[in-house]
């Protein structure tokens, strides 16, 4: 069986290709296509016109988001596509005598990379649609978690100015009790005007420990009443807190939805990895999505 090697350099609105044979000879001069369906189909036609008796092996560099549509479109059409880490391609580019860097040159470097991988019998294609789906879910989940972490920092910063000491009352500034208190307190016309009885009800509703409840209530009231925040800062900061809480609520719902989709996908696949103690759905999705089929790696 013979092979041809297609290197694809993807950017936001276009992609460049270079096609080589097993000897490294160019079969098709570097060519540019637009990131549109008709050009993706034109690429497929060009590849198939050169691969009557040879199997095409495609490769591209991970760009974060820009490569995804083309990557999945080619997989759906039955092609094997290798996705490279940019660090790998950078290393190969630096080994070239000519240091020119253009999209067409990068496409040629990627074509050489997949050709050399084939020679070394070290091809690592992850073209399993189920595992690629898990990879996208896992990526979405971790992206949401990062956004939640950023919001927590922003909330802590705003509260440290508005009511110093409040963030020290709770181990988790976004605990159910803390969020409920903030939502209740900033609804009043007078900023942070909340009664002791209202605070006690919130603590009781959230099953806070009785022996520490009164201390925490006193600490919250003190942080609200002893604020030294300048008057002209208060309303903008309170508005910011409201916006943060709104975004936080949306992100929690999004995370919950992604978790459901991950569970549904893994339950459908029933992978062996989920029988390992300590591997939950999100961890399992991350492992399966990133590694793909374990059989594509050489045994030790």
Image: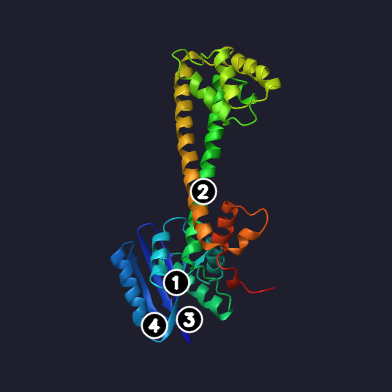
Q: Earlier in the sequence, mark 2 or mark 3?
A: 3
Q: Which residue was labeled with disc 3?
A: 24
Q: Residue at x 49, y 35 (%)?
A: 248
Disc sitting over residue 168 in the figure: none
The reply to whether residue 162 is in sight is: yes
Do the residues bearing badges 1 and 2 touch, measured as CB atoms within 8 Å? no
Q: Position of residue 50 (x, y in %)?
A: 37, 82
Please tell me whether mark 2 sits on a helix, a strand or a loop.
helix
> Quick one: label 4 or label 1, which is nearer the N terminus?
1
Determine whether 1 is above or below 199 in the image: below
The residue beneath circle 2 is 259
- Residue drawn 46% across the image and 26% down it: 242
Of labels 3 and 1, earlier in sequence is: 1
Q: Mark 4 against mark 1, which lies toward the viewer?
A: 4
Which of pointers 2 and 3 indicates the residue nearer the eye?
Answer: 2
What is the spatial separation of the Cα atoms under label 4 and label 2, in whole angstroms?
42 Å
Residue identified by numbered label 1: 7
Residue 37's x, y, as percent? 31, 64
- Badge 4, how many Cα within 10 Å: few under 14, some, many 20+? some
Residue 160 visible, this orientation: no
Image quadrant where residue 275 sits: bottom right
Q: Residue at x 47, y 12 (%)?
A: 190
Does dot 3 land on a helix, a strand or a loop? Answer: loop
Distance CA(mark 1)–CA(mark 2): 35 Å
Compute the Cα span from label 2 to label 3. Answer: 45 Å
* Residue designated by label 4: 51
Position of 222 with respect to 138 (left or right) is right
- Please tell me which residue is depicted at 52% across the width and 73% down the height of the picture: 113
């Amino acid at each position: 069986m013979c092979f041809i090697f297609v290197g694809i350099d993807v950017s936001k609105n276009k992609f460049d290709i270079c096609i080589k044979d097993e000897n490294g000879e160019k079969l098709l001069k570097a060519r540019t296509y637009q990131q549109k369906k008709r050009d993706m189909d034109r690429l497929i036609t060009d590849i198939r016109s050169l691969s009557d008796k040879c199997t095409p092996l495609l490769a591209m560099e991970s760009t974060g988001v820009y490569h995804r549509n083309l990557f999945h479109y080619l997989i759906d059409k039955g092609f094997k596509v290798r996705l490279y880490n940019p660090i790998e391609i950078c290393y190969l580019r630096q080994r070239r005598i000519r240091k020119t860097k253009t999209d067409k040159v990068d496409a040629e470097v990627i074509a050489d990379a997949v050709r050399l991988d084939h020679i070394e019998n070290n091809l690592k294609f992850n073209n399993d649609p189920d595992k690629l789906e898990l990879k996208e879910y896992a990526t979405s989940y971790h992206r949401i978690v990062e956004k939640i972490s950023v919001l927590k920092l922003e909330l802590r910063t705003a509260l440290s100015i508005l009511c110093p000491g409040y963030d020290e009352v709770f181990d988790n500034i976004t605990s159910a009790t803390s969020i409920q208190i903030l939502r209740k307190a900033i609804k009043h016309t007078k900023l942070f005007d909340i009664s002791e009885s209202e605070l006690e009800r919130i603590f009781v509703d959230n099953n806070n420990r009785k022996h520490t409840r009164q201390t925490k209530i006193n600490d919250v009231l003190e942080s609200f009443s002893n604020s030294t925040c300048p008057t002209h800062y208060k309303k903008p900061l309170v508005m910011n807190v409201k916006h943060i809480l709104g975004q936080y609520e949306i992100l929690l719902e999004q995370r919950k939805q992604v978790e459901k989709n991950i569970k549904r996908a893994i339950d459908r696949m029933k992978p062996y990895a989920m029988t390992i103690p300590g591997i939950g759905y999100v961890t399992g999705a991350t492992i399966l999505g990133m590694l793909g089929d374990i059989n594509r790696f050489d045994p030790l």
